[in-house]
Amino acid sequence: MPTIKEILQTMDYGPAPESTKEANAWLDQHGRRFGLFIDGAWTEAATTFATSNPADASELAQVTQATSDDVERAVQAARRAQPGWVALGGHGRARVMYAVARLLQKHARLFAVLETLDNGKTIRETRDADLPLAARHFYHHAGWASLQSEEFADYRAVGVVGQIVPWNFPLLMLAWKIAPAMAAGNTIVFKPAEFTPLTALLFAEICQQAGVPSGVVNIVTGDGAVGEAIVKHPGIDKLAFTGSTEVGRIIRKATAGTGKKLSLELGGKSPFIVFDDADLDAAVEGLVDSIWFNQGQVCCAGSRLLVQESVYERFIAKVKARMQNLRVGSPLDKSNDIGALVDPIQQQRIHALVESARLEGCDVWQPSCEAPTAGSWYLPTLILGASTSAAVAQAEIFGPVLVAMSFRTPSEAVQLANNTVYGLAACVWSESISLALDVAPQIKAGVVWINTANQFDAACGFGGYKESGFGREGGKEGMVEYLTPLAEDARPAAPVVTAVGSNQGRVKASEEGNPFAVDRTAKLYIGGKQARPDGAYSRAIMGANGAFLADIGEGNRKDIRNAVEAAHKASGWAKATAHNRAQVLYYIAENLAIRADEFAQRIAAQTGAKDAAREVQASIERLFYWAAWCDKYDGLAHQPPMHGITVALNEPVGVIGIICPNENPLLGFISLVAPALALGNRVVAVPSETAPLSALDLYQVLDTSDLPGGALNIVTGSSSELARTLASHADVDAVWRHDGSAEGCAEVERLSSDSLKRTWVGGAKGRDWFDAKQACGRTVLQHASQVKNVWIPYGV
């Protein structure tokens, strides 16, 4: 007679299929043919394309291929609806959004089945993860709508928003984007992915039932040409895109100089770090949720497994045993773990990358099971023995493929984790909370999960660093993405610059009667030392009356390179306590105050300003202001619906290149450099091209104020040439340009697309640097920082 253990070993899951009756009835109700949803009504289906079930390649419906004229009509409808949507008020918008959330819950099973049919992910995931979280986003952001007048009193809605999402989380991505946009008072032109449009079309019906005013939500379907039309449309005020890094670059280039607000949530190659003291069995289950959730078609999938060497073999054995028990099959079967890939093209790409690893000598391991023959499938895969530079270790595979390697020490784990152009998410597994919380801040990623994986909530921001994009979705920082500071509307139409002498840039004449006059050319300031320009060229600076004032160094590409290297060597500034950074800024202010008369005279000589003393005093006050913020720009502790907390840390961006304004040469310089330094960034600053001497006179102030060498580097010369170099430099993390050059600002945004660095540009408009609303506040702090959300569960 068999034992209980033997009986249990022979037991298996029986089939547990989910009914498709209601979903098919909904499709049949529409004749399996869909138009566009514009201005609260459906258009007739014109030119269409098929959307298919990835599990068996069967056609589900025909969907309209929108045209540029359709996009135009959608944008116009959104523009007409936007004033009324704002006028409805926060409470009115909240009530509508609350109705949307309730209807999502009411029809959750229909949405879940339709999503599984169209996308190929398992019904367990759509039912238990995607739908509850989508509804949660509308509930949460309905609350922000109610609180907008209080919590965002100094902001307004951006206007008309264009939103483009991928196929891996069709409905959830819709909720992530539409909910905050609606809450803030924007109207929307939304494009779902070509492969997975059906739940977006069902959502349009929900909008009608919930009483969303016509034109507030417009949904246009189609291929990449539709997305391109949205990106290039001049009537779009903000673009929100989730998708590949390659397309993100294209969008950044296309929007350069347009003034459109932009947020990009792009690719990832996330590390999953397991230390030797971790609960290995729990880590294995976390790994399953991290890399094989949604067939690995997740931007934050833990596709790089890093295991401490002492437990590597044991952990890999556990992973293989768990993979052997993963069930691959019909996504509608509630017993299955792995569903279908979205499309044969994706299947072919994954196969090619895995085969490249095999050709490089890697060990490719898959469980001994068979995938269905019809449709798009790929077995869960483990790759061992890959080098850190291998394609599978660096490229985003976007499939159920895990690449494993070992490490010896925590510092090596961090180094391996950061050895990627991406920076979206990471997992850290350790029973030592001290070790986990030491490692998490060192990882260059926007989200870090400790002893858990793939946790999301509407209250907690999500987004990446580096080539994983910029901007956040969810949380308060996600709301800010859909708002514009009111102070921006008050900016001058153009920079107000006092005219200077017409001899700018000429070689100075010899001093009459003194052929042996001492050359006092102002040098560059790099690594805490004055440095001659690499090119050995200088330019003359003339005063407002045309008289020669001084020569300055003409910085070039190599000078910028040296300054960036010095900035990276000064990484200790980012690690200094906020209190210490504040003391240094206070000290700079005090030393500037001692020489206030001298600086005022220099400003007057350069610009002819009658109130130069006022500018110096404002600069001193501005230093005190940003010193005060150093230890007060705290993060937040969120309480998501899990047993734990999420800590949102405000981290420095890194190395910031700053092109300073020509107007108010001292105050403009201080107003940009001081907040960057206050939050721990290192700066390469290009001072006013027409009046740089006020910044150069700061050298001695800096030398006597305990600012570490390299924290602030100053390179003079052509703003356009130096900005071009900074925007192209791969080791510069952000570029700010506020010199009033519309063409130059557009160029910075365009060139930044190569490494997807963050930008903050003023365009052709000016800024009143004396006005605290235009030059200070949380908006500037947001540009000088990036948010990292660290998830810390309790009791695991």
Image (tube, rainbow, N blue to C red):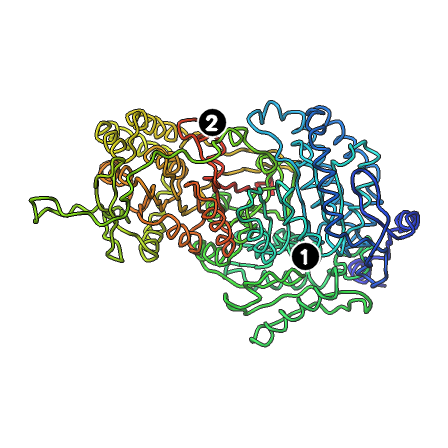
Task: Give the mark toward the camera: 1 or 2.
Answer: 2
**Where is residue 646 drawn, in percent x and y?**
57, 38
Residue at 28% x, 49% y: name it: 526
Residue at 31% x, 32% y: name it: 583
Tell me which numbered mark, 1 or 2, is placed earlier along the sequence: 1
Amino acid on which the number 1 mark rests in the picture:
Gln
Residue in front for this viewpoint, 544 or 227? 544
> Badge 2 is on which residue?
773
Q: Is residue 770 visible?
A: yes
Amino acid on which the number 2 mark rests in the picture:
Lys
The part of the image, by quadrant, that contains residue 620 is top left
Q: Can residue 702 be seen in this view?
A: no
Crowding at label 2, few (<14), some or many (≥20) Cα neighbours within 10 Å?
A: some
593 displayed left or right of 460: left
265 displayed left or right of 542: right
Find residue 297 and name its label: 1
Residue in front for this viewpoint, 706 or 594? 594
Label 1 element class: loop
**Where is residue 590 drawn, in percent x and y?**
26, 28
Q: Are marks 1 and 2 in contact (CB under 8 Å)?
A: no
**Where is residue 73 drawn, in percent x and y?**
75, 43
Residue in front for this viewpoint, 556 or 130? 556
Q: Quadrant of the C terminus?
A: top right
Residue at 25% x, 55% y: name it: 537
Residue at 34% x, 41% y: name it: 688
